[in-house]
Image (cartoon, rainbow, N blue to C red):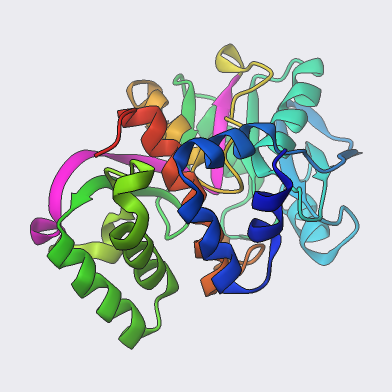
Amino acid sequence: MELHIEELFSSQDPVQVERLYSLGRERILDWMKGRPRADLRIVEVEGDQEVVVVIPTADSKGRRSREASRIFHPLHVVLVESSGNFFNYASSVNAGIRRAMDLSPRWVVVSNDDVHKVDGVKTLVDELSVATRGLVMASPSSYHSYRVSLVKMSPSFLRGMNVFGKVMRLPPAEVYSYLTLKYGAQLGVKTLVVIDSMLGPMKRVAGEVKDSFINAGSFMVLNRRILHERVLDETFINGYEDVLLSMKMRGDSEFIKFRIAEERGGSLGFGELRFLKSYVNEVYLNYLLWGSRT
């Protein structure tokens, strides 16, 4: 692990975090791939093992974990506890899936811990009883089962997006446009992942849409036939691992009529620092998808 980059990334000073993007794509990717993972502790809530629920959490005894466990009762729940600077969502999910595989379930649910009940577990189980695809998504919401697009945005649109983000106090719009204008070319960032509902009709003038698909997001269900030890790519740092999986699984996915609600930014917040740090995932995703620089 390159300590200098880690110090920049872990800083609470936005100016310091931004500096890491001046170091170049190769150094950033090497650091991401070699970054340590936080310790994990698995806590289980016994239940029906036909459907096993995997929930990454910072505190297996906390309010969110307790509520999530109640929501999915009487299913077997695998809480994967991990926290600190080296928390990695994909690593936690993969660890939970490995444990779930030991129980030979038909389905594995992957859920955030900041969920709230809408439909009951019976609805989920009944819907899964007739599902056949590898990736199953719940009824669409703002945080799961939503359409995203990969857009090669024009410089003029990025400048407008930056102004709009500042005026409307929308950190993702302000931060991503700024970083792309300043560092995007040297980092090989050809496209940005945008949520269609947030871009709205402006999508028509944003630039070239390279791809579009439904993203599973914070709640997904996996058929046991697709389970393996690394379902999610652990190079990502708490973001976009769901985007890559959804892209790969789009031909083997379906919706069920099951609703669940989540908190906005319940775990990572919704401020400037979150999106400054999350931009490393754009760098890595673009590397995987497009390879060479723009």
Residue located 48% across and 21% down the image:
134
Check residue 100 for magenta coloring. Answer: no
Pick the front one: 185 or 194: 185
Q: Which residues are magenta?
A: 203-223
Q: Position of residue 205 (x, y in %)?
A: 8, 60
Residue 210 position by quadrant: top left
Residue located 54% across and 74% down the image:
271
Pick the front one: 163 or 185: 185
Check residue 221 for magenta coloring. Answer: yes
The answer to whether residue 209 is left or right of residue 100 is left
Q: Position of residue 267 (x, y in %)?
A: 67, 62
The answer to whether residue 42 is left or right of residue 119 is right
Residue located 44% across and 33% down the image:
244
Residue at the bottom extreme of this rendering: 167
The answer to whether residue 196 is left or right of residue 87 is left
Where does the C terminus fall, quadrant-wise?
top left
Residue 215 position by quadrant: top left
